[in-house]
Image (cartoon, rainbow, N blue to C red):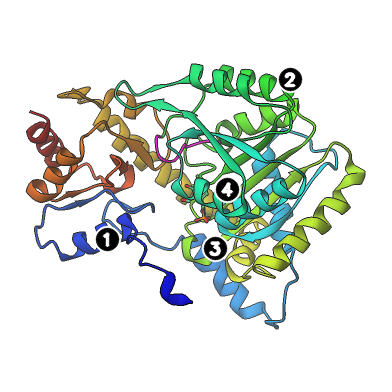
Amino acid sequence: MLEQLTAQPPDALLALIKLYAADSRPAKIDLGVGVYRDSSGGTPVFQAIKAAEARLLAAQDSKSYLGPEGDMGFVRAIMPWMLGEFDPAGRIDGLQTPGGTGAVRLAADLLLKIGVRRIWMGAPSWPNHVQIFDAVGLACETFRHLDVATQRLDFNALETALDKAEAGDAVLLHGCCHNPTGADYSEAQWDQIAETVAAKRLFPLIDLAYHGLGHGFEADGYGLRAVLSAVPEALIAYSCDKNFGLYRERVGALYAMTAEPGQQAAIQSNLCALARASWSMPPDHGAASVRIILEDEGLTGLWLNELESMRARMRSVRDTLASYQAIGSVDLAAVGQQNGLFSVLQLRPEQISALRADWGVYMAGSGRMNIAGFTQDNIPHFIEGLRAVTA
Ligand SMILES: Cc1ncc(COP(=O)(O)O)c(C=O)c1O
């Protein structure tokens, strides 16, 4: 029976990594892979994580199972950071998941279980969103998130889509640092979204995978707080893989807000049952390290400083790119207003290929670039290449 299966196309980004590694030109630039890079091109382990891991190693006396809910100390320690001044009044709880991916998957499973059949989302989005919703059988309805040519967020498209959505449909919203466009809603737009989602009785799923990497925890959480304040129920998929640099440790959590505090236990038991049927129990190490940091003032301070330097570096790269305003028809000015790891440029496939072949600039076929792949030193080379391929 296995012979019926044909080979799937290789993941384009993984293929790009191989091409980049095989390129011997010293001026090559990797804008493909979706992880933070420091100015020397590395993705180092946070000092705060190193310190927490040392404590974990010394204190851990068992590798026994954690249970499907994972490390609840971790799950609850994230909540004040995630929610800021929003008071959950006993209506929000969660469980640990293998990364933000696990959280989105579990959210999709739960949405299906409560009778949701359709989910609305802006496009482009993180490619795995559609794959996950497809896999569980939720129909995806997309609308244009950003007009890439003008780099303008298409708020009208969102309004029109939400207008068409029906009560009981879900809507996926990126909490901040939209992947791949970097284009986030303004506070006024979030207020409007929150109002519409509540008025139309849509079920919000908020994906917060880059919290703290845009303008800091408070500002990056505005949209989440606006929506939670307006609706009775919501799901939040949270990842610590970017803001603690823990990618391979797979650290995430899914939170559910219920209309009444008394409904929490039933929801939690359903989430545990769904998790049990997928991965049974999440891995411990990364989440335990995050908990140790958040329980200790000194380590929390160290982590925040490291995060701040990441954010400052990405901001300065964005500012430098934006200072070029426009290269040919490619608008760079907006990159300075966007947030997080990614932005998307309006480039044709042959221009993206020429950037790679002639200039050693590796970016995804969609025109997505990882802002952290730039340094102040390599930006002029990129601009020169962009000028040449758009001339
Ligand atoms: C929007 C979005 N959601 C979720 C995730 C998943 O994060 P994790 O690596 O923690 O599974 C990502 C990762 O790239 C993402 O960009």
Q: Position of residue 201 (x, y in %)?
A: 74, 26
The residue under label 2 is 199
The foreground one among 114 and 384 is 114
Of residues 104 and 219, the one drawn nearer to the viewer in this rendering:
104
In the picture, measured across the screen, residue 18 lies left or right of residue 147, that is left
**Magenta part of the chain:** 174-181
- Say which element carries label 3: loop
Q: Earlier in the sequence, mark 3 or mark 2?
A: 2
Residue identifier under label 4: 133
Query: Dot 2: few (<14), some (14–19), or many (≥20) neighbours within 10 Å?
Result: few
Please, what is the three-letter code of the amino acid marked with disc 1? Answer: Ala
- Marks 4 and 2, the one that precedes in the sequence: 4
Residue that label 3 marks: 250
Q: Which residue is mark 1?
A: 15
Q: Residue at x 62, y 73 (%)?
A: 56
Q: Nearer the viewer, mark 4 or mark 2?
A: 4
